[in-house]
Amino acid sequence: MRRAWKRSKDEVFAWVWLAVVLVVTGPPVAAVETLVVEVEGRRHELVGMPLVEAQDGGLLLLATDGMIWPLQPQEIKSRQRDDRPFTLLDRQQLAERLLAEMPGYSVFHTQHYLIVYNTSPAYAQWCGSLFERLFKTFFNFWKIRGWELQPPQMPLVAVVFDSRERFLGYATDEIGQAAHGIIGYYSMKTNRIAMYDLTGADELKRLRPQLRSTTHLNLLLAQPEAERLVATIVHEATHQLAYNSGLQVRFAGNPMWVSEGLATYFETPDLRSDRGWRTVNAVNRLHWTRFREKLAGRRSDALIGLLTDDARFHDPATVADAYSEAWAFTYFLLNRRSEKFVEYLKSLSQKQPLEEDAPAERVRRFSEMVGDLEELEAEFIKYMSRLRP
Ligand SMILES: [Zn+2]
């Protein structure tokens, strides 16, 4: 996901720049428009509602299937408005739309998700129960901390492929070569999670069909790939939940450390559980280890860098450290400054798409709402030095 995520952010930056240069018009009007667009050589007919409209005719369009299209003026071939109010597709319509896009696939329904898959039904079901467990935990987690999040406006979509090849066929279309280094990602544009079965669980089932499904699942979770698989699924599903619950706003200027800090906070797998995950606030060993290794060389102004410099999350030389630091700081804040941090997140959640704080504004907002950076740095380092998994 990670590099895929980065790509989405790049798209956001391009749009933020556009929004600064051009004057953004007022709040979106909830009427339906039908557009014919041509993006990267392909024609699409889109039905949706403009979220942001630039003076030169560029658009951020929310389509009825939940996708958000950033459209340049030259990509829009025709545009027609009518008086019908905008509504998102319902579950049945959305399932039909997805099956039309992916013929030969099946849809598995859970309470909050719609899983499009070509794996075995058992594998799709396992993914579904993992998502639902995260969903419940996620909403409870914030509710306990004084934030009653909004339920998603439509079922959350996950696409689960049986092989890396099919995953790449789908993902390279959207994110290009970045797809080769990842096993799954959340897309701010499509609002979907896409991933593939890293464990080859279905292959295992085919080779040893006599096994009961629980044995089958235990074998799956016993594989060395399982930890990375579960962490990735939960990480991406956390991004999706954050953007569909009002915690974050898609295409708004969310600092990278916040988005990735939250996703890494929740991603900790627990392979003793039959779903591979059951808890939050566990120490993320991967990021904890990395963060501690770098502690000795830490600069005194490191927090300012974390808050303001999103490029660190994109650069291969710094990306691993940036993720570890985002995890560590988020873990610290949720354990030691929970109330203030939640207020800070609430203030970020009020942002509109394409609305971005300049670096100095990011520091000001954070310091005012959470605390003085120098004092926080001292306490943070002390806390992390004593923390044990
Ligand atoms: Zn992420």
Image (cartoon, rainbow, N blue to C red):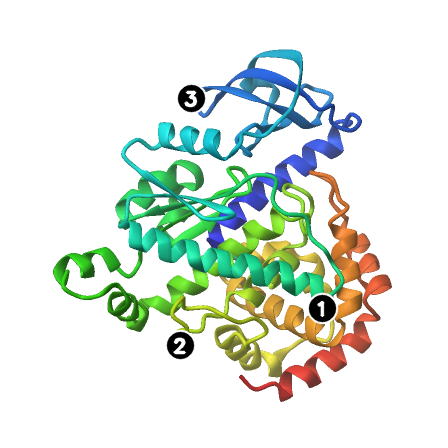
Quadrant housing residue 40: top left
279 sits to left or right of 194: right
Disc on res. 375: none
**What residue would you read off at disc 3?**
42
Per the model, the C-alpha gap separating discs 3 and 1 is 43 Å
Instruction: Measuring from the top left, give residue 174's x and y in whole percent.
Output: 43, 37
Residue plotted at (27% across, 34% down): 104
Find the residue positioned furthest to the bottom.
386
Q: Identify residue type, mark 2.
A: Arg
Per the model, the C-alpha gap separating discs 1 and 2 is 35 Å
Per the model, the C-alpha gap separating discs 2 and 3 is 47 Å
Crowdedness near tag 1: few (<14), some (14–19) or many (≥20) residues, C-alpha within 10 Å: some
Instruction: Measuring from the top left, give residue 39's x and y in whole percent.
Output: 48, 24
Res 182 seen here: no
Residue plotted at (80% across, 71% down): 373
**Could you say which is closer to the camera, residue 28 or residue 386?**
28
Instruction: Measuring from the top left, give residue 160's x and y in whole percent.
Output: 36, 47
Earlier sequence position, callout 1 versus callout 2: 2
181 sits to left or right of 363: left
**What residue would you read off at disc 1?**
303
Crowdedness near tag 2: few (<14), some (14–19) or many (≥20) residues, C-alpha within 10 Å: few
**What residue would you read off at disc 2?**
272
Quadrant housing residue 95: top left
Q: Identify residue type, mark 1.
A: Leu
